Amino acid sequence: MIRRWGRDPVRTGLVPAVEDAARQATASSSTPGLAVALVQHGQVVWAGGDGVADPTTCWPVTATTRFQAASLSKPVTAWGVLRLVERGRVGLDEPILGHLRRWRPPPSLFNADGLTVRRLLSHTAGLSVHGYLGQTPDRPLPSIAASLAGETGASFPVELLEPPGRHWRYSGGGYSVAQLLVEELTGRPFADYLRAEVLEPLGLTASSFRWSRTAETARPHDAVGGPLPDFIFAEQAAAGLVTTAPDLARFLAAALAGPHGEPPGRGVLSPTGVRLALAAAYWVGSCAGSSSPSGAAASGAGSSASSAYSPSSMSSSSSTSSSTAPSGGAPAT
C-alpha cells in the first residue's frame, strides 16, 4: 500500500471512502479482487487492493499486483505513437501506407490512402476487427503482420469497411496497424520501443507490453469468477499491456501538471501533444447525420467524442483522480 499524505485531508476523507467502496464492490460481484490508486496534484498519493488475486490460493490483491490491462493498453500506445509524431518520424495526418512494408489492407471499395495516425488512434480510420481473444502462452506469438492478415486463426483480417474519416468505429485492428507502424518506423519490437520511450521515462517500472507471469500477476477469471488460463496477445498495442494500479495512475498523472510544476507529458510528450491526445477527433451529435470530424470537441446530451486516448479519456476536471484495475477478467478485448 502506498501512502504519501502528511497533513493532506485525503487521508481522513477520500482514502477510507475508496477502501470502503472497494470492499463493497468485491463483496457484491463475482470479481475476486481489485486494486485502486489515487492521484492528487499530478502524483500518486495512495494505492491499495481488496479481495484476492488468485482464488485458488487466496493470495490477496495489493498495490503491487499486476493485471492484464486489456484495452487500457490503447492510451499508453497512443503516447508512444504521438511521440514519433512529435519527433517528426510521421505526420499526424500523413497517409501511413508508404511506411508499411509488411502489410497492406485487402482490396476495398475505399481509398486506403486516408489511413492516418490521427484516424488510427481515434477509431475513425474505418477499419475492422473490434477486439481480440488472445491465445494461450504455450503457442508462439505470431507477428503483428500475420495478425493483420488474419493468418493466426484467432481473428479476421483487418480491412477497410468504410471511407477513412467518415465515422467513428471502434477498432482494435486500427491499433494493430499502429503497432506495425511503430515497428516499421523504429526497426524495434513494439514492446521494446514502448518500454524505452514511454514506460520507463514515466516510471511505469512494473508494466510491460511483453507478457510474463510473475508471482505478482493476478489469475484470470470468467464472468462468474471461474478460473481461466492465461491469454497473451500478438496485438500488443490494442490489448497487451500488463500493469499495476499505481503504474496506471502514474500514467494518468503524467497527463496532468506535476506537484512541483512539471509540465503535462513529463518529457515523453509536450504539453501540446498531451492536449492533442485528449482533444476529440470526431464528434457525433444527438441528431442523425450531425457530425463534425477533425478535432472538433463537443459536449452536451446525446453527444460522444473520440480522442487519441481511446477507449476512454484519462483527463480529470479535479485535482484527485482514481485508477482501478479488476483482478483477472475475461480475455476478449
Image: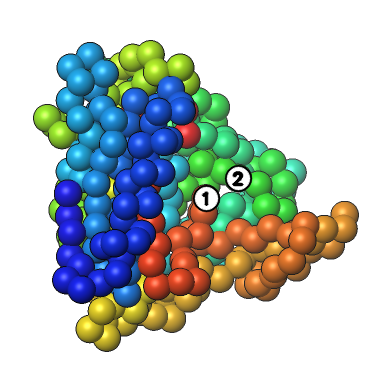
Q: x, y (%) of residue 113?
A: 61, 58
- Badge 2 is on which residue? 170
Q: Residue furthest left?
A: 215
Establish if 84 lies above or below 174. below
Q: x, y (%) of residue 332?
A: 47, 28
* Residue appearing at x 34%, y 79% in the figure: 257
- Badge 1 is on which residue? 311
Left or right: where 59 falls relative to 258 = left
Q: Residues within 10 Å of mark 2 (few under 14, many from 20)?
A: many
* Residue appearing at x 26%, y 79% in the figure: 259
What amino acid type should be assigned to the residue bearing mark 1?
A: Pro
**In the rendered structure, which disc, 1 or 2, sits on the residue that comes first in sequence?**
2
Q: Nearer the viewer, mark 1 or mark 2?
A: 1
Identify which residue, 206 or 109, lies in the foreground. 206
Q: x, y (%) of residue 131?
A: 52, 34
Circles 1 and 2 in contact, beta carbons < 8 Å: yes
Left or right: where 158 falls relative to 42 = right
* Residue appearing at x 44%, y 43% in the figure: 71
Q: Give the alpha-carbon distance from disc 1 to disc 2, as whole Å.
A: 8 Å
Q: Quadrant of residue 156?
A: top right
